[in-house]
Image: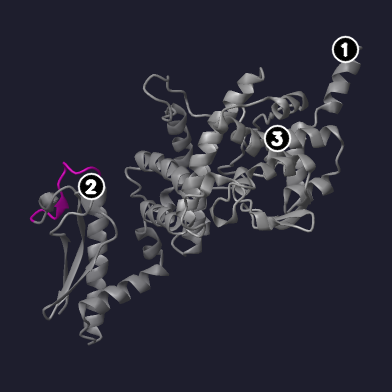
Amino acid sequence: MATAKIITWSRPNKDGQYPIGIKIYNNGKTSYIFEGHTVPSRDAWNAKKQEVRKAVPNAARLTNYLTKKLTEVRDQALEMDTNKENPSPQRIKKVFQNELENTEAGRKRLMFADIAGQYLQDALDSGDLDVYRSEKSRIKRFLEFSDGGQIPFSEITVEYLRRYVIFLKKDKNRNGNENTPRKPLSNRTIMNHLLGVRTLWNRAITAKMASRDDYPFGAGKISIKFPESPKIGPDFDELEKLEKIELTKRRLHHARNICLVSYYFAGMRITDTLLMKWTDFQNGRFHYTMSKNGEPGSLKIPEKAMAIINQYKDDKPAHDLVFPDLKRLESLLDRTNLRRAVNSSEGRINKAIKEVMGMIGSTKNTSPHKFRHAFAQRAEEKDVHPKVLQKLYRHESILTTMKYQSNFSHRKADEALDAVLGL
């Protein structure tokens, strides 16, 4: 007859922790069920008392979880023995895991930390480095709040998330250095944290590891609404000064070029600007597929843009790229390395363009992305139709375009203010 017991693995993992789980054995054969739970030492499991020693964080909860799981494994083994299957440990493990996947017990046994860990690993494997970095920090805060994430999704209720919001409001921004005072998290940051939890909830539902009946988001529950943030880019006078200023330092000259080319091509994102290739210029037009949403299209080539691009004609960077920022990459197909290189380049350009803006007398907190805002502001001033802007921005929905442009529509409000004040 097959038997099972709770054991700790004989060797530590890369973090120096010892995996703890279920050992199944029968007729000299063994199999193990580990799901990512660890303890700091092999003797953290008290076999005599059948409990995780109290010195281990969340000992009681981990003991309950392991004990419940052990009971389920033994019940499965007993049922198979009763049916005279004489199962191997591997067979018990397989049947146990497959059967639980589609049951309420299976959904409850999968913890938030399990889904979160797989989500981060998927982001890494697919090369989505930005997603991995941003979500990792948000998940870390939820793990702190939820005792390491050892909580089933059914217990992440509306009330639980309201307490989480209070926890976040008490937390401080950790991005500053030691000399920078910590600031409370902004409402936008808090909404991003809730959005991360909702994303994992949806993944758990899709994997049938959580029930939509327990879903805590939506009308009358937890609502995620992002506060509006000001979108301010360089104005027309500042753009003219940027075009005319003589810059002797190459890094400043290059940063100015990147930002202006982005502006000239309808506020093209910096990733697409850095990935611009010579072969993208065909029949007097610039053809490219937006990296954010995969939308293809083409644009007229402004003379000002071509004048800047031609400055790089003799550089001959790798991969047929116009700009040299990514030339050290062996391949553009490695998404992780590509994302890392783009982020590094953007950081350098961001620092340099701030310096240039100071040189023309501007106090605006400018970044490469703000030149997208600059284009949108000029488009609003020129009354460009939203349908045209939708095509320029590659938005899938006209509603997205109209919502984005509303950030720059000030004329009617200004006229109303003047009318009321008699100006």
> Disc number at residue 273?
none
Q: Which residues are magenta?
A: 48-58
> In terms of depth relative to the viewer, which is nearer, 18 or 349?
349
Residue 342 in view of the camera: yes
The first of marks 2 and 3 along the sequence is 2
User: Badge 2: how crowded within 10 Å, few (<14), some, or many (20+)?
Assistant: few
User: Badge 3: how crowded within 10 Å, few (<14), some, or many (20+)?
Assistant: many
> Disc number at residue 60?
2
Distance from Cα at disc 1 to Cα at disc 2: 67 Å
> Disc number at residue 373?
3
Residue 54 in picture, x, y percent from top left: 16, 43
Tell me the amino acid under the disc marked 3: His
What residue sits right under mark 1 in the picture? 421
Q: Is residue 335 above or below residue 2?
A: above
Residue 84 in picture, x, y percent from top left: 22, 87
Residue 91 in picture, x, y percent from top left: 26, 79
Residue at screen point 10% across, 53% down: 49
Distance from Cα at disc 1 to Cα at disc 3: 30 Å
